[in-house]
Amino acid sequence: MKLLNPLFTLPFLCIAAACSRNPSVLQDPAGPHAEITGKLFRYFFAVNGVIFLLVLGFLFFALWRRRERQLVAPLQPDAQGEKRLLTGVVIAVSLTIIVLTSFVILSYAVDKNLIGLDKNPALEIEITGHQWWWEVRYLSKTPSDVFTTANEIHVPLNTKIRLILKSSDVIHSVWFPNLAGKRDIIPGHDQDLFIRVDKEGTWQGRCGEFCGMQHAFMGLTLFAEPKPAFEAWEKAQRLPAEEPQSAEEKHGKEVFTTGACAMCHVIRGTDSTGYSSNAPDLTHLKSRATIGAGAAANTKGDLGGWILDPHGIKPGVHMPTISQEPQDFQALLSYLETLK
Ligand code: CUA
Protein backbone atom coordinates (compact mmCIF):
# COMPACT_ATOMS: atom_id res chain seq x y z
CA MET A 1 0.00 0.00 0.00
CA LYS A 2 2.93 2.33 0.81
CA LEU A 3 4.09 2.14 -2.82
CA LEU A 4 0.72 3.38 -4.02
CA ASN A 5 0.74 6.49 -1.86
CA PRO A 6 2.61 8.90 -4.20
CA LEU A 7 0.61 7.59 -7.15
CA PHE A 8 -2.70 8.60 -5.56
CA THR A 9 -1.49 11.55 -3.57
CA LEU A 10 0.20 13.47 -6.40
CA PRO A 11 -2.82 14.21 -8.63
CA PHE A 12 -4.91 15.27 -5.61
CA LEU A 13 -2.14 17.50 -4.31
CA CYS A 14 -1.67 19.10 -7.74
CA ILE A 15 -5.38 19.91 -8.02
CA ALA A 16 -5.63 21.26 -4.49
CA ALA A 17 -2.28 23.05 -4.37
CA ALA A 18 -3.75 26.10 -6.06
CA CYS A 19 -6.34 26.54 -3.30
CA SER A 20 -4.38 26.68 -0.07
CA ARG A 21 -1.01 26.10 1.51
CA ASN A 22 -2.30 22.97 3.21
CA PRO A 23 -4.43 21.28 0.56
CA SER A 24 -7.80 20.27 1.96
CA VAL A 25 -7.70 16.62 0.95
CA LEU A 26 -7.97 13.30 2.69
CA GLN A 27 -4.74 12.33 0.94
CA ASP A 28 -2.78 14.77 3.12
CA PRO A 29 -3.87 13.59 6.57
CA ALA A 30 -3.10 15.71 9.62
CA GLY A 31 -4.46 13.24 12.14
CA PRO A 32 -5.13 9.53 12.73
CA HIS A 33 -8.82 9.61 11.68
CA ALA A 34 -8.04 10.84 8.16
CA GLU A 35 -4.96 8.62 7.99
CA ILE A 36 -6.97 5.45 8.66
CA THR A 37 -9.86 6.47 6.40
CA GLY A 38 -7.35 7.44 3.69
CA LYS A 39 -5.87 3.94 3.70
CA LEU A 40 -9.33 2.44 3.21
CA PHE A 41 -10.01 4.91 0.41
CA ARG A 42 -6.78 3.96 -1.38
CA TYR A 43 -7.62 0.26 -1.09
CA PHE A 44 -11.14 0.82 -2.51
CA PHE A 45 -9.70 3.02 -5.25
CA ALA A 46 -7.04 0.48 -6.26
CA VAL A 47 -9.37 -2.54 -6.27
CA ASN A 48 -12.16 -0.73 -8.09
CA GLY A 49 -9.63 0.71 -10.55
CA VAL A 50 -8.36 -2.78 -11.42
CA ILE A 51 -11.95 -4.07 -11.83
CA PHE A 52 -12.82 -1.10 -14.04
CA LEU A 53 -9.80 -1.76 -16.28
CA LEU A 54 -10.59 -5.50 -16.43
CA VAL A 55 -14.20 -4.84 -17.46
CA LEU A 56 -13.04 -2.43 -20.17
CA GLY A 57 -10.44 -4.99 -21.32
CA PHE A 58 -13.03 -7.77 -21.62
CA LEU A 59 -15.45 -5.45 -23.41
CA PHE A 60 -12.94 -4.45 -26.06
CA PHE A 61 -11.76 -8.06 -26.40
CA ALA A 62 -15.36 -9.21 -26.99
CA LEU A 63 -15.94 -6.48 -29.59
CA TRP A 64 -12.73 -7.38 -31.37
CA ARG A 65 -13.49 -11.12 -31.37
CA ARG A 66 -17.03 -10.65 -32.66
CA ARG A 67 -15.69 -8.73 -35.65
CA GLU A 68 -13.03 -11.35 -36.39
CA ARG A 69 -15.41 -14.30 -36.50
CA GLN A 70 -17.94 -12.67 -38.83
CA LEU A 71 -20.83 -14.68 -37.37
CA VAL A 72 -23.62 -15.26 -39.84
CA ALA A 73 -25.28 -18.47 -38.65
CA PRO A 74 -27.54 -18.38 -35.56
CA LEU A 75 -25.82 -19.53 -32.37
CA GLN A 76 -25.98 -23.26 -31.83
CA PRO A 77 -25.92 -25.01 -28.44
CA ASP A 78 -22.33 -25.96 -27.91
CA ALA A 79 -21.30 -28.07 -24.88
CA GLN A 80 -17.76 -26.74 -24.75
CA GLY A 81 -18.93 -23.14 -25.03
CA GLU A 82 -21.47 -23.70 -22.22
CA LYS A 83 -18.72 -25.07 -19.98
CA ARG A 84 -16.47 -22.09 -20.66
CA LEU A 85 -19.35 -19.74 -19.92
CA LEU A 86 -20.08 -21.52 -16.63
CA THR A 87 -16.40 -21.32 -15.60
CA GLY A 88 -16.42 -17.61 -16.42
CA VAL A 89 -19.56 -16.99 -14.33
CA VAL A 90 -18.16 -18.97 -11.37
CA ILE A 91 -14.88 -17.00 -11.47
CA ALA A 92 -16.71 -13.66 -11.75
CA VAL A 93 -19.12 -14.45 -8.89
CA SER A 94 -16.30 -15.75 -6.66
CA LEU A 95 -14.20 -12.62 -7.33
CA THR A 96 -17.20 -10.40 -6.55
CA ILE A 97 -17.80 -12.21 -3.26
CA ILE A 98 -14.11 -12.00 -2.30
CA VAL A 99 -13.88 -8.30 -3.16
CA LEU A 100 -17.14 -7.35 -1.41
CA THR A 101 -16.27 -9.41 1.67
CA SER A 102 -12.85 -7.77 1.88
CA PHE A 103 -14.55 -4.34 1.62
CA VAL A 104 -16.97 -5.19 4.44
CA ILE A 105 -14.25 -6.62 6.71
CA LEU A 106 -11.90 -3.69 6.11
CA SER A 107 -14.70 -1.12 6.63
CA TYR A 108 -15.59 -2.82 9.90
CA ALA A 109 -11.93 -2.84 11.01
CA VAL A 110 -11.57 0.85 10.10
CA ASP A 111 -14.77 1.76 11.99
CA LYS A 112 -13.55 -0.17 15.04
CA ASN A 113 -10.19 1.60 14.82
CA LEU A 114 -11.88 5.00 14.57
CA ILE A 115 -14.19 4.32 17.52
CA GLY A 116 -11.14 3.24 19.57
CA LEU A 117 -9.64 6.69 18.97
CA ASP A 118 -12.67 8.48 20.39
CA LYS A 119 -12.38 7.62 24.08
CA ASN A 120 -11.63 10.15 26.83
CA PRO A 121 -11.34 13.44 24.91
CA ALA A 122 -9.21 16.07 26.66
CA LEU A 123 -11.04 19.02 25.14
CA GLU A 124 -14.67 19.65 24.18
CA ILE A 125 -15.69 22.33 21.73
CA GLU A 126 -19.31 23.05 20.89
CA ILE A 127 -19.80 24.18 17.32
CA THR A 128 -23.18 25.53 16.21
CA GLY A 129 -23.93 26.02 12.54
CA HIS A 130 -25.89 29.12 11.60
CA GLN A 131 -26.73 30.46 8.15
CA TRP A 132 -23.79 31.14 7.31
CA TRP A 133 -21.26 31.14 10.10
CA TRP A 134 -20.07 28.96 12.94
CA GLU A 135 -20.53 29.74 16.62
CA VAL A 136 -17.73 28.17 18.63
CA ARG A 137 -17.89 27.59 22.40
CA TYR A 138 -14.99 26.16 24.37
CA LEU A 139 -16.55 24.15 27.16
CA SER A 140 -15.09 23.65 30.61
CA LYS A 141 -16.10 22.20 33.95
CA THR A 142 -15.39 25.66 35.39
CA PRO A 143 -18.22 27.88 34.10
CA SER A 144 -16.08 31.03 34.11
CA ASP A 145 -13.61 29.33 31.75
CA VAL A 146 -16.22 28.85 29.02
CA PHE A 147 -15.81 31.32 26.19
CA THR A 148 -17.30 31.91 22.76
CA THR A 149 -15.72 32.80 19.45
CA ALA A 150 -16.64 32.30 15.81
CA ASN A 151 -15.54 30.69 12.55
CA GLU A 152 -12.05 29.77 13.75
CA ILE A 153 -10.92 27.14 16.22
CA HIS A 154 -7.55 26.71 17.84
CA VAL A 155 -6.56 23.28 19.14
CA PRO A 156 -3.50 21.86 20.87
CA LEU A 157 -1.47 19.26 18.95
CA ASN A 158 -1.74 15.53 19.70
CA THR A 159 -4.87 15.96 21.83
CA LYS A 160 -8.14 14.05 21.59
CA ILE A 161 -10.88 16.58 20.90
CA ARG A 162 -14.63 16.11 20.87
CA LEU A 163 -16.52 18.53 18.66
CA ILE A 164 -20.16 18.73 19.77
CA LEU A 165 -22.07 19.77 16.68
CA LYS A 166 -25.37 21.64 16.68
CA SER A 167 -27.44 23.53 14.15
CA SER A 168 -29.66 26.50 14.87
CA ASP A 169 -31.58 26.56 11.60
CA VAL A 170 -31.10 24.18 8.64
CA ILE A 171 -28.95 21.11 7.96
CA HIS A 172 -25.25 21.93 7.91
CA SER A 173 -22.27 19.59 7.84
CA VAL A 174 -18.82 19.95 9.36
CA TRP A 175 -15.99 18.77 7.17
CA PHE A 176 -12.25 18.96 7.73
CA PRO A 177 -10.93 16.83 4.84
CA ASN A 178 -7.45 16.52 6.37
CA LEU A 179 -8.79 15.44 9.74
CA ALA A 180 -11.96 13.35 9.54
CA GLY A 181 -15.03 12.49 7.52
CA LYS A 182 -18.06 14.77 7.14
CA ARG A 183 -20.63 14.95 9.90
CA ASP A 184 -24.10 16.25 9.05
CA ILE A 185 -25.91 18.29 11.70
CA ILE A 186 -29.68 18.20 11.67
CA PRO A 187 -31.39 20.85 13.84
CA GLY A 188 -32.38 19.31 17.18
CA HIS A 189 -30.18 16.29 16.62
CA ASP A 190 -26.72 17.00 18.04
CA GLN A 191 -23.74 15.11 16.67
CA ASP A 192 -20.21 14.29 17.79
CA LEU A 193 -17.07 14.47 15.71
CA PHE A 194 -13.77 13.37 17.21
CA ILE A 195 -10.49 14.71 15.91
CA ARG A 196 -6.84 14.69 16.80
CA VAL A 197 -4.38 16.88 14.97
CA ASP A 198 -0.79 15.69 14.85
CA LYS A 199 0.53 18.16 12.29
CA GLU A 200 1.02 21.79 13.16
CA GLY A 201 -0.62 24.20 10.74
CA THR A 202 -3.82 25.76 9.48
CA TRP A 203 -6.46 23.32 8.28
CA GLN A 204 -9.51 24.42 6.33
CA GLY A 205 -12.95 23.14 7.19
CA ARG A 206 -16.10 23.70 5.16
CA CYS A 207 -19.80 23.29 5.51
CA GLY A 208 -20.38 20.07 3.57
CA GLU A 209 -24.14 20.32 3.08
CA PHE A 210 -25.91 22.85 0.87
CA CYS A 211 -27.57 25.20 3.35
CA GLY A 212 -28.66 28.21 1.32
CA MET A 213 -27.33 31.18 -0.55
CA GLN A 214 -23.95 31.54 1.20
CA HIS A 215 -23.19 27.86 1.77
CA ALA A 216 -19.90 28.39 -0.10
CA PHE A 217 -18.82 31.05 2.40
CA MET A 218 -19.27 29.00 5.53
CA GLY A 219 -15.66 28.34 6.32
CA LEU A 220 -14.34 27.00 9.60
CA THR A 221 -10.57 27.34 9.97
CA LEU A 222 -8.63 25.19 12.42
CA PHE A 223 -5.27 26.30 13.81
CA ALA A 224 -3.30 23.40 15.30
CA GLU A 225 -0.66 24.69 17.69
CA PRO A 226 1.78 23.35 20.28
CA LYS A 227 0.20 23.25 23.74
CA PRO A 228 1.86 26.43 25.16
CA ALA A 229 0.70 28.51 22.16
CA PHE A 230 -2.82 27.08 22.45
CA GLU A 231 -2.97 27.80 26.17
CA ALA A 232 -1.83 31.39 25.61
CA TRP A 233 -4.55 31.84 22.98
CA GLU A 234 -7.16 30.25 25.24
CA LYS A 235 -6.18 32.50 28.18
CA ALA A 236 -6.43 35.61 26.01
CA GLN A 237 -9.83 34.55 24.62
CA ARG A 238 -11.29 34.18 28.12
CA LEU A 239 -10.52 37.78 28.98
CA PRO A 240 -13.10 40.50 28.39
CA ALA A 241 -12.33 43.12 25.78
CA GLU A 242 -9.77 45.77 26.70
CA GLU A 243 -11.01 49.25 27.46
CA PRO A 244 -10.54 51.68 24.57
CA GLN A 245 -7.88 54.35 25.12
CA SER A 246 -8.31 57.25 22.67
CA ALA A 247 -11.32 59.59 22.56
CA GLU A 248 -12.22 58.25 19.10
CA GLU A 249 -12.11 54.63 20.28
CA LYS A 250 -14.22 55.50 23.32
CA HIS A 251 -16.77 57.13 21.04
CA GLY A 252 -16.67 54.01 18.86
CA LYS A 253 -17.50 51.85 21.87
CA GLU A 254 -20.49 54.08 22.56
CA VAL A 255 -21.61 53.78 18.93
CA PHE A 256 -21.39 50.00 19.27
CA THR A 257 -23.18 49.61 22.60
CA THR A 258 -25.95 52.12 21.95
CA GLY A 259 -26.51 51.36 18.27
CA ALA A 260 -27.79 48.50 16.16
CA CYS A 261 -24.57 46.39 16.39
CA ALA A 262 -25.23 45.43 20.02
CA MET A 263 -28.66 44.05 19.14
CA CYS A 264 -26.97 40.96 17.71
CA HIS A 265 -23.25 41.06 18.57
CA VAL A 266 -21.65 40.68 21.97
CA ILE A 267 -18.42 42.25 23.16
CA ARG A 268 -17.69 40.83 26.59
CA GLY A 269 -16.72 43.55 29.07
CA THR A 270 -19.12 46.10 27.59
CA ASP A 271 -22.70 46.52 28.72
CA SER A 272 -24.03 45.44 25.31
CA THR A 273 -26.98 43.18 25.89
CA GLY A 274 -26.85 41.19 22.67
CA TYR A 275 -27.70 37.56 22.29
CA SER A 276 -24.58 35.66 21.38
CA SER A 277 -26.29 33.14 19.11
CA ASN A 278 -27.59 35.79 16.72
CA ALA A 279 -24.23 36.79 15.34
CA PRO A 280 -20.52 36.22 16.02
CA ASP A 281 -19.09 37.23 19.41
CA LEU A 282 -16.75 40.15 18.69
CA THR A 283 -14.82 40.29 21.99
CA HIS A 284 -11.56 39.31 20.28
CA LEU A 285 -12.55 40.03 16.69
CA LYS A 286 -9.07 41.08 15.62
CA SER A 287 -7.54 37.79 16.77
CA ARG A 288 -9.28 36.14 13.83
CA ALA A 289 -7.86 35.86 10.31
CA THR A 290 -11.05 36.49 8.35
CA ILE A 291 -14.48 38.07 8.64
CA GLY A 292 -17.79 36.74 7.32
CA ALA A 293 -16.69 33.09 7.85
CA GLY A 294 -13.91 33.42 5.32
CA ALA A 295 -15.63 35.94 3.03
CA ALA A 296 -12.96 38.64 3.48
CA ALA A 297 -9.62 39.25 5.17
CA ASN A 298 -9.78 40.76 8.64
CA THR A 299 -8.09 44.06 7.70
CA LYS A 300 -9.32 47.52 8.69
CA GLY A 301 -10.29 48.24 5.07
CA ASP A 302 -12.22 45.02 4.56
CA LEU A 303 -13.90 45.37 7.94
CA GLY A 304 -15.02 48.89 6.99
CA GLY A 305 -16.36 47.60 3.68
CA TRP A 306 -18.13 44.77 5.49
CA ILE A 307 -19.89 47.15 7.92
CA LEU A 308 -20.90 49.57 5.15
CA ASP A 309 -22.11 46.94 2.70
CA PRO A 310 -22.09 43.34 3.98
CA HIS A 311 -24.27 42.24 1.06
CA GLY A 312 -21.68 43.53 -1.41
CA ILE A 313 -19.19 41.01 0.05
CA LYS A 314 -21.56 38.19 1.00
CA PRO A 315 -24.93 38.55 -0.78
CA GLY A 316 -27.83 37.28 1.32
CA VAL A 317 -25.94 37.51 4.64
CA HIS A 318 -28.26 38.15 7.59
CA MET A 319 -26.25 41.17 8.74
CA PRO A 320 -28.21 44.29 7.78
CA THR A 321 -26.77 47.40 6.20
CA ILE A 322 -26.91 50.16 8.79
CA SER A 323 -26.44 53.78 7.80
CA GLN A 324 -24.11 55.70 10.06
CA GLU A 325 -22.72 59.21 10.27
CA PRO A 326 -19.17 59.21 8.81
CA GLN A 327 -17.56 60.21 12.15
CA ASP A 328 -19.51 57.47 13.99
CA PHE A 329 -18.45 54.91 11.39
CA GLN A 330 -14.78 55.89 11.67
CA ALA A 331 -14.95 55.78 15.47
CA LEU A 332 -16.65 52.38 15.43
CA LEU A 333 -13.99 51.03 13.09
CA SER A 334 -11.21 52.37 15.31
CA TYR A 335 -12.84 50.77 18.35
CA LEU A 336 -13.24 47.39 16.60
CA GLU A 337 -9.54 47.51 15.72
CA THR A 338 -8.74 47.45 19.47
CA LEU A 339 -10.49 44.10 19.98
CA LYS A 340 -7.29 42.04 19.85
CU1 CUA B 1 -23.96 25.39 6.17
CU2 CUA B 1 -23.69 24.68 3.91
Image (cartoon, rainbow, N blue to C red):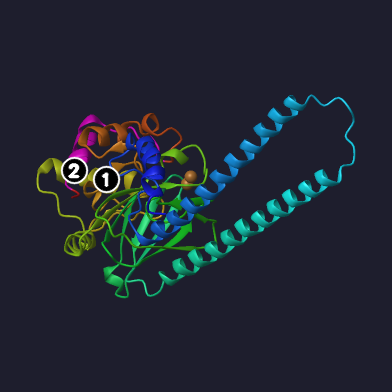
Q: Amino acid at mark 2?
A: Glu
Sequence order check, earlier mark of 2 and 1: 1
Mark 2 near mark 1, Cβ–Cβ under 8 Å? no
Q: Which residue is mark 1?
A: 256
Please say whether residue 170 is visible from this viewpoint.
no
Q: Quadrant of residue 50?
A: top right
Callout 2 crowding tier (Cα within 10 Å): few <14, some 14–19, many ≥20: some
In terms of depth relative to the viewer, which is nearer, 268 or 205?
205
Query: Which segment is the magenta one?
Result: 319-338
Which residue is rendered at x = 23% and y = 59% of the image? 237
- Determine whether 112 is above or below 96 in the image: below
Residue 47 is situated, as x and y percent measured from the top left of the image, at: 54, 50
Q: CA distance from mark 2 to mark 1?
A: 13 Å
Q: Amino acid at mark 1?
A: Phe
Residue assigned mark 2: 337
Which residue extends farthest front? 80
> In screen coordinates, is 212 left or right of 339?
right
Q: Element at badge 1?
A: helix
From the viewer's perspective, is residue 297 above or below residue 243? above
Closer to us: 38 or 84 = 84
Image coordinates of residue 279 in percent, x first then y, are 38, 49
| Mark 2 vs mark 1: in front | 2
Depicted 282 relative to depicted 147: above or below:
above
Tell me the element at label 2.
loop
